[in-house]
Image: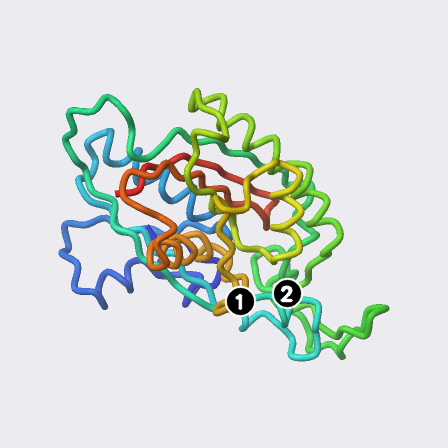
Amino acid sequence: LLCTQSPYYFLPTTACLLQHRLGIPNTAGALDFNLGCSGYVYGLGLAKGLIETGQATKVLLVTAETYSKFINDEDRSVRSIFGDAAAATLVVSVESESSGEFIGPFVYGTDGSGAQNLIVPVGGMRTRTANEAELIADKFGNKRTSKNLYMNGAEIFTFTLRSVPKAVQVLLEKAQCSLADVDVVVFHQANKYMLDHLRKKIGIPEEKYVIALNNSGNTVSATIPIALTEAARDGRLKAGDKVMLVGFGVGYSWGAAIIQWR
């Protein structure tokens, strides 16, 4: 499973090219799915579904983005936020004497009315090509063309504060636990300002909350696995910990899950 919004080509599927490069047997299926900041949580859900329905015993989930290719050098509103990165997660079927789940439950949400607030307007089939237009400057002096990434930061911030706390509450109810039962919380690493506001609004203790932005910035679908890796490396994440994952952003799309760290 390859989660990306910056594939090599419209076709063929980039996951097929990745299968060949990695030398994965031809008996494996391969597919792309186009999601951004919520993509890692959705990918875990897809992997879990494939395994639990007997369609697979192992799933390699790759999240990979090169948003820098969409960003205009003269657009400081996004140039200082996003980074390029990839992460790989292997999800494997296990037999356990425990009645609990290692991955799940899940909560998903979508609000396509906000699609225009984080978008690359030109390049898809709706607007396939555009003439090389002169740079358009916004009121802050940021410059971009219709082929570049555009983000309405204020609207994204409002959406996040509206949707994420509700998703957390629904997830806790579905998991039949409280925030006190969760050992570590890893949100999509959008930016520190937004993460601090979310933590305070939801009431998450600072010692449970992972912020891992210094070395990579916002790497879209790869932020959560990068943050998990850094937390494990630093000793903040230990075997047996109950971890809350929440992805949110472009789409608008969001997803949340509980996992037990192995």
1 and 2 marks in contact (CB < 8 Å): yes
Q: Say whether residue 84 is left or right of residue 43.
A: right
Q: Position of residue 123 (x, y in %)?
A: 58, 64
In the drawing, does residue 84 fall left or right of residue 260? right
Q: Circle 2 sits in a helix, a strand or a loop, which is it?
A: loop
Distance, label 1 to label 2, CA atoms, is: 8 Å
Disc 2 marks a residue whose amino acid type is Leu
| Marker disc for residue 149 | 2
Give the residue displayed 54% in from the left and 72% down from the top: 68
Q: Please identify the quadrant where the C terminus is shown.
A: top left
Give the residue drawn at x 41%, y 38%: 183
- Marked residue nearer the N-terminal end (1 or 2): 1
Left/right placement of residue 85 relative to residue 75 reads: left
Q: What mark, if any, has residue 67 been given in the picture?
A: 1
Q: Position of residue 117 (x, y in %)?
A: 70, 52
**Residue 134 placement: quadrant:** bottom right
The one of 195 and 108 positioned closer to us in this rendering: 195
Residue 124 marker: none
